[in-house]
Image: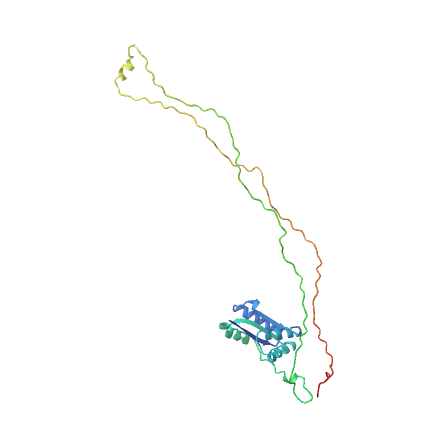
Amino acid sequence: MSTIVIGLYKEPRAARKAFQALVAAGCQEKDIDTFNGAGDAGKATQELLNHGFAKAVAQRYGAAVKQGHALVAADIADQDADAAEAILDENGAIDLPNTAAQQPKTARGTVVEEEAVPVVEEEVEIGKRRISKGGMRVTTEVTETPVRETVRLREEKVDVEHHKADRALSHREAEAAFEEKSLEMTATSETPKVTKEARVVEEVVLSKKAAEHEKTVEASARRTDVKVEPIGDRPGTKR
């Protein structure tokens, strides 16, 4: 749950200081409203009415804003309300001025009923925002192309043959004739080998170009004006 904490200040500069102190203490800027100047008097009154303030109290704060005071209203969690009030007080919050002496009087004494009609004026601010205009998407996919080529392969084979002989041993052969020995011959063969090398053959580049142009935007700001005119007695009305 949350509650509205308010602080009234003599001038906008003090209100801005209180606003910054609340933000520094962890309050969200979107939860804090500041009212100052005659143009904000009606807004301040309506804001307080929307948050459950008594009509007479809300109108007194609106009158104070109209007279040049500044009002800070913050939507604060219940458990942090006391701390927020302390921050507002530390930054120069003042008591609500007594406006009874400024209230219009009837011929017989004080005013017994009062209604406030706010004058509302819209402020138009024309800016710009980004919208999507579409674009291009580049994706990659892998395809395979068969490659066929005939290569000549060499293959060796070891054969053993026995040849008849009848000859005298040479002196060298005679010395080694009865020594144990081993003789080996290894055959080799060729097998196909595939080597691949990836090469860049083309590049697809996405780029974005920006251009500026001027466009005239028209809007209308609404304002409510208050017309005051006397009314006579209604038929059948008794004095």
Q: Is residue 122 above or below residue 162?
A: below
**Residue farthest along the bottom direction in this orientation:** 108
Q: Can residue 8 be seen in this view?
A: yes
Q: How many labels does the image show?
A: 0
**Viewed as shown, does residue 131 lie left or right of 87?**
right
- The image shows residue 197 at horizontal and vertical percentages of 51, 35
Please tell me which residue lies in front, 82 or 45.
Answer: 45
Q: Which residue is drawn at 59% across and 70% down?
A: 33
Q: Quadrant of residue 238?
A: bottom right
- The image shows residue 94 at horizontal and vertical percentages of 58, 78
- The image shows residue 99 at horizontal and vertical percentages of 63, 82
Q: In this view, does 79 lie above or below 193?
A: below
Q: Is residue 189 above or below residue 65?
A: above
Q: In which quarter of the image is residue 118?
A: bottom right
Q: Can residue 14 be seen in this view?
A: no
Q: Is residue 186 above or below residue 5?
A: above
Task: State which quarter of the image contains the C terminus.
Answer: bottom right
**Residue farthest along the front direction in this orientation:** 236
- The image shows residue 112 at horizontal and vertical percentages of 64, 85
Colouring convention used in this rendered image of the protein: rainbow
**Viewed as shown, does residue 41 lie left or right of 193?**
right
